[in-house]
Structures are given as C-alpha cells and as structure tokens.
Image (cartoon, grey):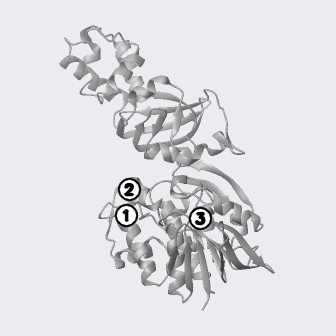
C-alpha cells in the first residue's frame, strides 16, 4: 500500500487526501493549525462560494493567473462533478447571481465538517499542530517529509497543499514556497490578488461602511487607458474601497502596483470612477433630479437628496458638488444641477495602492506552472512530489473560481499520487 503525505489540510489538501485514499493509499494529512480548513470556514464571508456554473472556457477566462494550465485539472474534476460529490456527501447547493454556487445552508462550517468527516470515512489520518519544514529527497525521488519539531514521516508521495500567503491567521504563511524552493522549484513572487484598494481622498472615511448595489465602476490610468470596468456591489471603508467589483478589479492592477515584493507609487495617475445611477443616462438622471427639486423646492439643497442617494453619501456629494448646502432648491441654477448630474455619473477617487497581502482573498504567484505536469500536478523536478491549490501560480476572480481550482487540483494530485 502506497504511503501518501498531504502537507496542508485546506480544501485542496482534504480533496487530495480523500481521493488518494479512495485509490487505495494510506494517507496522512499534516496540518499546522489546531484544526483543518480554517480558511475554508471564512470563504464567501462565511457562506462558502463553492464553485460557479460557468462552462469550461468561461472558467479559464475567469482565471487570469495561468488559467490555461488548469484545463486538464478541470477536465479531471469539473464543477458538475464537484456539485455531484457534495450532494452525495450531504451538502445541498444553490445557484445565485453570476452563477455562484453556495451550500443551501449558507454555512461554510457545514462544508468543512462534511469534508473532514469524509476523510475519516476513507480512513485518512489528520495530524494537527504538525508544521512541515523540509522534504527529504533521495535520488531525485521523495522519501519523507520532516516537521519543524523534528518528526519525520516516511512516504512514497507528498502533496504540497499549504496555501499561499493570504489570511495568515488561518495558517497560510507561505511555508510551502520555502519547502518547494529548497527542493529546486522556482517560486514566482507572491502578490496580493483580490484585495481592497486604498484611496487618497480623506473624506472617504466619512463613507466607511456604506455598501452600494447596482453601481458601475471604471478604473482609468493616466486619463486615457481603461484598465477595468464592472457592475455590481461595492463598499466604502476607512482606507478606501472594497466589495466584489472592487476586489475583482484589483487583479488588473498587479503589474501597476506591485513589483519585487513592494508596492509601487503611481501618484495621482489612477482614478476610480463610480456611476451611482448606471441605469439612467445623464439626460434621464437630470429629469429625475428636476422632479425631486420640484418636490423639495422649498427645502435647502442639503436636505433635498434623500430620495436619490443613501443618507451617508449625501453630505459628501453635497460637498463635492460645490453647491452651497444651505441654498434653497428653487434657487439652484441649471449649471449647478448639471454639475450634480456629472458628479453622480462620474464620482471619482484617486487609487494609490493595495491593502497588504494578508488581507487578500487569494495569492497571485507561487510555484511556477512550468515545473508542474498539468495532467497530474506532479513536479517535473522531483518524482513523487505533487502540488495542489493556492501554492501553485494560478489565481482567479471572485465567484467560486478559486475554490474550484483547489478542488480540481486537489483531486488530480490525490489520484495521481497513488500511481
């Protein structure tokens, strides 16, 4: 019976363990934390966005970080097989906006408990508080893995599924990069992907906690180059902006903002434009505002926007519109009104950088895909060494794509590790 060691008990590691055991191997999962799958329990704001209904080609297009590398892994275990597996394991699923698939319970802990329970059914041993430190390689083949406390686990195969560097409190601290590097692998510089953005404007703090739905955004560099456009939900924070469409936009700024482990300064050259009323043309919005101004003609300007905007946004809009807040609505000029229209359709902030990598949803970078067999997830340099999940230099947008990467590469590595 083959002995397979899985380093890391996240979703990729659990899946690798389940399917290696199903293929007849004796499997041990070594998890550095006091319990497995800590990061899985907080994904999707605790609701666990498991995967997406997208077709294969759409999946690849939603993985800007080496998506083509994943064709074989997705063929081996696609989103439909994942849903069937989860349903059979007792996790009912549902589809939400954008094809996002969640457990019906809206509870990531339920998913974690089912996966951990499944490993027990397959007689997979999970050893917690076991931090892996070094691969022991003999004649180009994996022979064992050594823990930080000195324990050594002899084995025929090792699957490195230790994650990236996002959410370090869950155990993702880049340990696998060091282990793989010492075994001869190239590590592409880890960077924050899917991360909130920092704004220059001080007034942004006044909007902290304001969540907006059905808005559109546009990121423009040097007044001409459109880097990203999207529609959906966003959130203002004390440092800038966050939320689904902002986080997805951040992936398009990696080369602009991040190099050699450092954040770069771009001055005032990057602007985020928000359209608060994308369903209305400027002309239609002007008509809407005129109706509101007739309704509130005897009120001061600062008290006339309650029907149009969220309460928290009004003082900032009033200030930025440069219309006297105490001016009576019936005295506002056409030029002033059109200035308000333009502000609501082109509300801009200056973006100066990313939040740190430990606040990112996912890590871009990791083990070079050039050194991994995409059909098996086996190292091209060390026989018996496999990779799964975020440790690999692959990363996708929000929407369930990154968890599917974990499950598909975990499955592929687990099955292949028993060959």
Label 1 CA crowd tier, 10 Å (few <14, some 14–19, many 20+): some
Asked whether residue 418 appears in the rendered view, the answer is no
**Residue at 60% of width from left, 42% of height from top?**
253
Residue marked by disc 1: 109
Are discs 1 and 2 less than 8 Å apart at CB? yes
User: Of helix, strand and loop, which one carries label 3?
Assistant: loop
User: Of helix, strand and loop, which one carries label 2?
Assistant: helix
**Residue at 29% of width from left, 8% of height from top?**
327
- First in residue order: circle 1 vs circle 2: 2
Q: Taking 325 as reference, is 78 above or below it?
A: below
Residue marked by disc 2: 46
- First in residue order: circle 3 vs circle 1: 1
**Residue at 54% of width from left, 27% of height from top?**
200
Front in this rendered view, residue 159 or 234: 159
Residue 184 image point, x, y percent: 78, 67
Residue 121 image point, x, y percent: 42, 83
User: Of helix, strand and loop, which one carries label 1?
Assistant: helix
Q: In the rendering, which numbered label is found on residue 162?
A: 3
How far apart in space, not on screen, are marks 3 and 2 (Cα)? 21 Å
Q: In the rendering, which numbered label is found on residue 141?
A: none
Are discs 3 and 2 less than 8 Å apart at CB? no
Quarter of the image where the N terminus is located: bottom right
Asked whether residue 113 appears in the rendered view, the answer is yes
Quarter of the image where the C terminus is located: bottom right
Residue 281 image point, x, y percent: 36, 32
């Amino acid at each position: 019976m083959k002995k397979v060691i899985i380093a890391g008990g996240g979703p990729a590691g659990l899946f690798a363990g389940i399917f290696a055991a199903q293929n007849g191997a004796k499997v041990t999962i070594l998890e550095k934390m006091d319990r497995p799958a800590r990061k899985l329990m907080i994904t999707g704001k605790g609701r666990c966005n498991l995967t997406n209904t997208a077709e294969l080609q759409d999946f690849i297009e939603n993985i800007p970080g080496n998506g083509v590398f994943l064709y074989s892994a997705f063929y081996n275990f696609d989103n439909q097989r994942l849903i069937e597996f989860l349903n059979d394991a007792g996790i009912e699923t549902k589809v939400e906006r954008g094809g996002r698939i969640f457990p019906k319970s809206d509870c990531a802990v339920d998913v974690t408990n089912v996966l951990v329970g499944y490993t027990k059914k397959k007689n997979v041993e999970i050893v917690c508080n076991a931090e892996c430190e070094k691969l022991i390689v003999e004649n180009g083949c994996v022979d064992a893995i050594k823990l930080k406390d000195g324990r050594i686990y002899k084995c025929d195969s090792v699957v490195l599924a230790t994650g990236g560097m996002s959410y370090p409190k869950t155990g993702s601290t880049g340990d696998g990069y060091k282990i793989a590097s010492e075994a001869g692998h190239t590590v592409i510089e880890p960077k924050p992907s899917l991360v909130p953005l920092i704004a220059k404007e001080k007034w942004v703090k006044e909007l902290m906690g304001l969540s907006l739905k059905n808005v559109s955004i546009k990121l423009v560099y040097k007044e001409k180059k459109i880097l990203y456009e999207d529609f959906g939900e966003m959130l203002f924070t004390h440092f800038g902006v966050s939320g689904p469409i902002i986080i997805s936009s951040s992936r398009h700024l990696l080369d602009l903002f991040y190099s050699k482990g450092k954040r770069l300064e771009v001055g005032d050259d990057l602007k985020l434009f928000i359209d608060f009323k994308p369903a209305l043309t400027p002309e239609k919005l002007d008509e809407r505002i005129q109706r509101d101004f007739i309704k509130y003609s005897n009120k001061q300007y600062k008290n006339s926007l309650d029907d149009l905007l969220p309460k928290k946004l009004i003082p900032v809009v009033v200030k930025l519109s440069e219309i006297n807040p105490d001016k009576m609505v019936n005295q506002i000029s056409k030029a002033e009104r059109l200035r308000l229209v333009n502000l609501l359709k082109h509300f801009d902030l200056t973006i100066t950088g990313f939040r740190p990598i430990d606040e990112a949803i996912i890590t871009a970078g990791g083990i070079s895909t050039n050194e991994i067999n995409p059909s098996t997830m086996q190292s091209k340099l060390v026989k018996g060494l496999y990779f799964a999940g975020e440790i690999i230099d692959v990363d996708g947008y929000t929407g369930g794509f990154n968890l599917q990467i974990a499950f598909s590469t975990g499955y592929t590595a687990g099955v292949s590790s028993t060959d």
